[in-house]
Amino acid sequence: MSWIALATYRRAGGLAPALVLDNQLYDLEAARAAGLPPLPDAWVTQGVEAMLRDWANAQAWLRDAAPMAASLAASGAIRPVDGGAAAVAAPFVPSRIFCAASNYASHANEMGTVLAAKSQSKPYMFLKLSNTVIGNGETIQMPPETSKLDWEVELAAVIGKRCRRVSVEDALDAIACYTIVNDISARDLNIRSDYPFKHDWFQGKCHDTFAPIGPWLVPAWQIPDPQAVSMRLDVNDEPMQQDSTANMIWTVREQVAYLSTIVTLEPGDVIATGTPTGVGMGRGIYLNAGDRLVASIEGIGRLSNQVQAERL
C-alpha cells in the first residue's frame, strides 16, 4: 500500500487539509475533484479534526484512497501545493496534550531522577495546553524569564476513538495516527523554591510555542509497532538525541490504558510518549535565539523549528 499522511497547509484565505504523498502535499479538495473516492464535505471544510472525529470512516477511506492518490500524483492529475514544506502548518491544534515524564531510563539518569521499579510504579503524566502548539517551520519564542531553554523529541500518539478504561491489549486500537512532538522546556522555570512543591511544570512547559507538532499525521497502520521506531533530534545540524522507542519504560499501549483509567480519552487527544537521553540539561547546554532544531522520527518525517527571543 502507498504511504500516505494527513496535513494542514496555509493557502490564500486560511488553512486547508492536504494528503501527503512522498513528502509532497496535495490539496484534499483538489484530489477529490480529480477522482478519489467520495468523502464527506466536512472533511474538506473542517479539515483534519473532522477526520479524527470520524476516524473509523476516515481510516477506511484513506486505505482506499492511498494507491489512487499515488497514481494521480504520478500522472500529474494532481499537483503539489505551492510552497512545499514552507506551507505546512500544525496538522491540528489539540485541546489536550498528555506528556509522559521520565519514560526512558537513560533520560532519567541524565536528569538525576531516581525511579522506582516499574513493578512498584505507574506512568507519570502531565499536560501541555493548546497555546503551546506550533507547526513545522514556525518559531519557538524564548521567554526573557529563561536562560535554560531545552528540547525533547517524542513520538506522539493521536487518539481516534472515545475510550475509557481500555485494556493494554486493546489500547493501540484507540490510536488513529502518530506524529512528532518537541516538548520544549524552560528548565530554570521548572523548579520553585518559594513553595514546598519542588516542580512547576506549568511554568516551565506551557509557554506559548512550547509544543511544536507535526509535520503531519501518519495513520497508525503504517507504524504497526510503535515500540520499534528510531528517533533523533539535531540542534544546528549536530545530533543531540538518537534512540529507539524500544527503550521506553512504559509502552504506548500502557500509557493509553493508564490515561484511560483517569479520563475518557477523546478523538484528537495527543499523547507525547516521553523523550530519550541527550537533552540540553543533561549535556549542560541550552538553546539560544537563532538555533535551529530538527526532530525526526522513522516513518513520520522531520519537524523543523527555529528559536527566536520573544518580542515584548
Image (cartoon, rainbow, N blue to C red):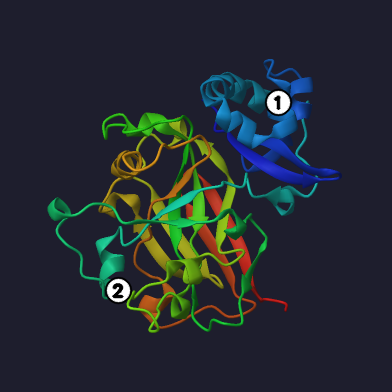
- Name the residue carrying label 1: 42
Residue 224 image label:
none
Residue 53 location (% of width, % of height)? 57, 29
* Callout 2 secondary element: helix
Choose top left, top right, bottom left or bottom right for residue 276. bottom left
Q: Is residue 118 visible?
A: yes
Amino acid type for the residue under numbered disc 2: Glu
Amino acid type for the residue under numbered disc 1: Ala
Which of the two discs, 2 and 1, labels the residue nearer the N terminus?
A: 1
Disc 1 crowd rating (10 Å Cα; few below 14, some 14-19, many 20+) is few
Residue placed at 14% from the left, 54% from the top?
A: 120
In this rendered view, identify the residue nearer to me: 208 or 289.
208
Image position of 13 with respect to 130: above or below: above
User: Seen in the image, is 307 located left or right of residue 284?
Assistant: right
**C-alpha span from label 2 to label 1:** 47 Å
- Name the residue carrying label 2: 110
Residue placed at 48% from the left, 71% from the top?
A: 204
Residue 301 location (% of width, % of height)? 54, 49
Residue 230 location (% of width, % of height)? 39, 52
User: Seen in the image, is 160 located left or right of residue 284?
Assistant: right
Choose top left, top right, bottom left or bottom right for residue 221. top left
Image position of 225 with respect to 245: above or below: above
Residue placed at 39% from the left, 41% from the top?
A: 263
* Callout 1 secondary element: helix
User: Seen in the image, is 221 located left or right of residue 258?
Assistant: right
Disc 2 crowd rating (10 Å Cα; few below 14, some 14-19, many 20+) is some
From the viewer's perspective, is the residue at label 2 or at label 1 nearer?
1
User: Seen in the image, is 79 located left or right of residue 261?
Assistant: right
- Farthest residue to the top: give it: 38
Q: Is residue 75 visible?
A: no
In this rendered view, identify the residue nearer to me: 128 or 59.
128
